[in-house]
Image: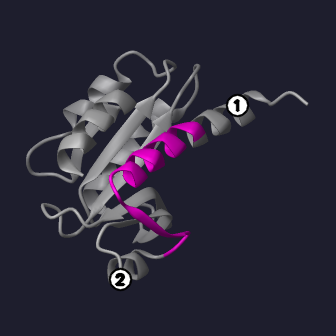
Amino acid sequence: MALTQGGRANQAGRILETNVESILIGHSYFQVGNHVSKDFLLTANLLKKRYAKQVSIGNGIYQTSLKVDFYVVGLPVMPSGLIIECKWQESGGSVDEKYPYLNLNIQNSYPAPTIVVIGGEGMREGAIQWLRKQVTANNNLLAVQTLDRFIAWSNKNL
């Protein structure tokens, strides 16, 4: 049975997340769970270098529950951890319309510095540039990177 456009988009997004997870594993990080709380991850200190997927971090700007794609703990320069969000847009759609919402949540509700890993060629012109302009020295959005740039960053920082 053929996948719907939404099904293909979800599958492509999972592939991007799988690549990010492979990078974490390649840098000796161990998964401690899925769908866990930030508090569980931060106190599960039997493993120094650890991560979890779909971590509940509290409420966002709309006072609804927020989950992040990856929460990574064990980077010496980031004692509060690192959040990694994956955003894929292969064809025209709405992910780029969600960037302002994502940015506001990162600035106001995320408990750790955040990298957004982007992929696909379906974002509207200017959407990625707008999101990258939100990266400044005094906010929680650390970087907006393609997968290859994230690999280069992680080789130096993870």
Q: Is residue 97 above or below residue 103?
A: above
Q: Which residues are magenta?
A: 15-36
Q: Are marks 2 and 1 in contact (CB under 8 Å)?
A: no
Q: Residues within 10 Å of mark 1 (few under 14, many from 20)?
A: few
> Helix, strand or loop at disc 1?
helix
In the image, taking residue 120 as reference, residue 11 lies left or right, namely right
Seen at 21% across and 46% down, the residue is 142
> Helix, strand or loop at disc 2?
loop
- As shown in the figure, which amino acid type bears the numbered disc 2? Leu
**Residue 17 makes an appearance in the image:** yes
Q: Is residue 55 above or below residue 129?
A: below
Viewer-nearest of labels 2 and 1? Answer: 2
Check residue 18 for magenta coloring.
yes
**Residue 15 rendering spot, x and y as whole percentages:** 58, 38
In the image, taking residue 47 as reference, residue 33 lies left or right, namely right
Determine which quarter of the picture holds residue 105.
bottom left
**Residue 72 rendering spot, x and y as whole percentages:** 34, 62
- As shown in the figure, which amino acid type bears the numbered disc 1? Arg
Determine which quarter of the picture holds residue 152.
top left
The residue identified by callout 1 is 8
The residue identified by callout 2 is 46
Q: Is residue 136 above or below residue 94?
A: below
**Residue 60 makes an appearance in the image:** no
Q: Residues within 10 Å of mark 2 (few under 14, many from 20)?
A: few
